[in-house]
Amino acid sequence: MPPVACLFLGQTHLMKLKTIVEAIESFAPLALQESYDNSGLICGDWDMEISSALIALDLTDAVLDEALAAGCNLIITHHPLVFHALKKFPENDPTTRLLLRAIRHHLAIYAAHTSLDNSVGGVSYFMATKLALTRIQVLSPVRNQLMKLITFVPHQHAAAVRQALFDAGAGHIGDYDQCSFNVEGYGTFRGAAGTNPYVGQPGIQHREEETRIEVILPAFISSRVLKALKESHPYEEVAYDLVPLANDWQYAGAGIIGELPRPMTAGEFLTLLKQTFRCAVIRHSTPLPKPILNVALCGGAGSFLLDKAIAAGADAFVTADVGYHRFFEAQNRTLLCDIGHYESEQFTAELLLSGLKDKLPTFAARISAQSTNPVNYFS
């Protein structure tokens, strides 16, 4: 398999590591990572100046050598170098050796793993775009990640406060933004001695015509949204309710299901997979005697989503690291395809580069030229 070509964005422009991490976590929030995962900053000083970054699926000696040769002092990977807790640091341990090499050379390491998998437009979604799928939906949406903010604003300030909430990231529902619900009414309040009310007098009950504003937001940006609310609101004391929601977040979560541009035979579809993901081999269950149109995808080890893919009506489910008995479970229900772990996630570096380019257009980053696939095929 040929190495991934190098891509560049921007020119060398020193930037704090903290700024770069905040940019990554704006599109791959740590709140979305699985409980077993170790996404985030693996090593590095938040205040260190970063000249450029190298992006790879995994951190290997070859990737680290490439970063040093290119003058990159940040490596961004999909898979975390440190996945399990480390209690000892022997030099003969591969993880320890790489970690100590990075530290000795003052390299920062960041991993966006399941935080990127589960994000809006994440790894599986990117796979779907490679197959030109349409009518894309998340296969297993995350739960308990949405909140509703309700606040009360004088009529003449409602537009400004609403815009501040939108600018902070609230009000997104699917492909729509600046979504809110508004009701006209009035509020009453009485300030204690020593208060400085925006309207009215201390010690006297005041009635004010107000707009009730409601917006939806992801829980992990609640602090930012509340800060924007308080800074834009004219009142000395801002009344608001922040309510957790049990709604599924339909645009974030594990796996994707979508529709091919046209129905395909099993042979046509497997050929498309082999060409698109540059597979040396595809392990698959027995094809069903019907065309393939609806396709489910999950980058990496996604066989845990098999039942959800079948329930969603997937004619085929594409993932990696599928166990022997899973193929029995798929028989006569869907075409289960194991294209390989590396093959399913090889485009993740492109996704990370695109996210960085959108957030930090002046920051220099490149995709590693190294293929980090540890699996070889004999034919």
Image: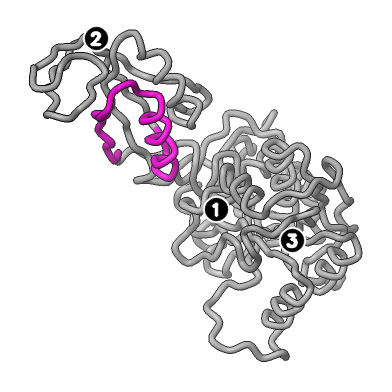
Mark 2 / mark 3, whichever is N-terminal: 3
| Circle on res. 184 | 2
State the quadrant of the C terminus.
bottom right
Q: Which residues are magenta?
A: 217-245
Which of 136 and 143 lies nearest the eye of the viewer? 143
Sequence-wise, the earlier of marks 3 and 1 is 3
Q: Position of residue 203 (x, y in %)?
A: 8, 22
Question: Can you give x and y, in whole percent of width and height, for residue 46 in the image?
Answer: 62, 59
User: Label 3, label 1: how many angstroms apart (C-alpha)?
Assistant: 17 Å
Residue at left offset 75%, top offset 55%: 50
Q: Nearer the viewer, mark 3 or mark 1?
A: 3
Q: Identify which residue is drawn at 82% across, 47% down.
A: 275
Mark number displayed over residue 115? 1
Badge 2 amino acid: Glu
Q: CA distance from mark 2 to mark 1?
A: 39 Å
- Quick one: label 2 or label 1, which is nearer the N terminus? 1
* Residue 130 is at least partly visible in this image: no
Q: Which mark is residue 75?
A: 3
Q: Amino acid at mark 1?
A: Ser
